[in-house]
Amino acid sequence: MIPVHVLHKEEIKEIKVVELPLLKQIPLSEAHRHQFYECFVFLKGGGTHTIDFVDFPINDFSVHIITPGQVHQISREKNSYGYVYMFDLAHFSHDKNIEDFLFDHACFDVKEFSPLYHFDESFNATLTGLSGQIWKDSHSTGALRNKLMINQISLLMLYCMQHTISKTGNNDAKHSDVYTAFRRLLNVNYTTMKKVKDYAQQLNITEKLLNEIILQRTGENVSSLIFKQLILEAKRLLNSGYTAKQVAYQLNFTDPAHFSKFFKTQTGFSPSEFT
């Protein structure tokens, strides 16, 4: 069973910073999910970070972003170290670009929008300085403690955003804005909106055009992406201890048998075989 980690309302008002120290032995953390964001900064890497059932390497001087609902598990080597920042999206509502950047990590598949940011050597000193300052600010007792951390983490997010642009370009592809809007809609509504026409209506375009845009961007049609989102959340819930019946109702299927048939058609195995 995958536990869900929660920060109480009083705790989430303040950004929480935890040090990832050197280890005496190599531990394997249990798979779990959060109701808040996490940003890992690894100054010294080594090991594997599994995010939504996909393995990512833990590199030196890298940043990993985890969103609410994602299932993740860390197996890091003994000499790895760094920090983890825990926060709510509302902490960055002052900057729409950063807020959208963080939210999009929840909306896109991890294979499409990687949660890992591995910088070149020229950035090492900057990342070390930034993470050190955030750690220092987290131990401050001043009235502006939280604002200082928000500003420093905002700067880190801007560097991550710049890193993404440098790798992929400015993403000026035609209809890119429609694709992003679709992904955001899907992330919020996939349990209640399961037909292509529902999304086309919300985006004020035809079903044909929406399918063409999605096909051009992903090589798949809209229905396929809707199904993938449902399967991903089903896997998360099944690994969190939910029964197939509970998952079926959580995802608004008409009955458990319908869900089980859908799951096996999409994955090749039944819900019970997956867990």
Image (spheres, rainbow, N blue to C red):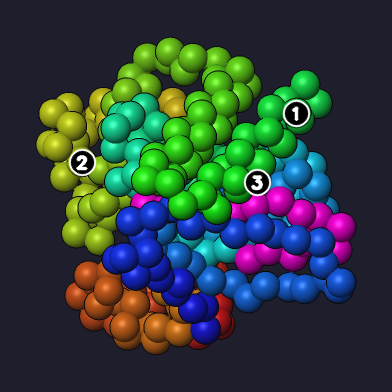
167 or 121, nearer to the observer = 121
Please state which amino acid type lies under the numbered disc 1.
Answer: Ala
Q: Is residue 3 left or right of residue 115?
A: left
Please state which amino acid type lies under the numbered disc 3.
Answer: Val
Mark nearer the viewer, 1 or 3 = 1
Residue indicated by mark 3: 41
Quadrant where the C terminus sits is: bottom right
Disc nearer the start of the sequence (1/2)? 1
Q: Which residues are magenta?
A: 73-88
Badge 2 density bin: few <14, some 14–19, many ≥20, Cα 10 Å: many
Q: Is residue 163 above or below residue 260?
A: above
Q: Tell me residue 10's x, y (percent).
A: 31, 65
Residue 61 sits in quarter? top right
Residue 47 sits in quarter? bottom right
65 drawn magenta: no
87 drawn magenta: yes
Task: Look at 43% across and 46% down and name the residue there.
Answer: 142
Please state which amino acid type lies under the numbered disc 2.
Answer: Tyr
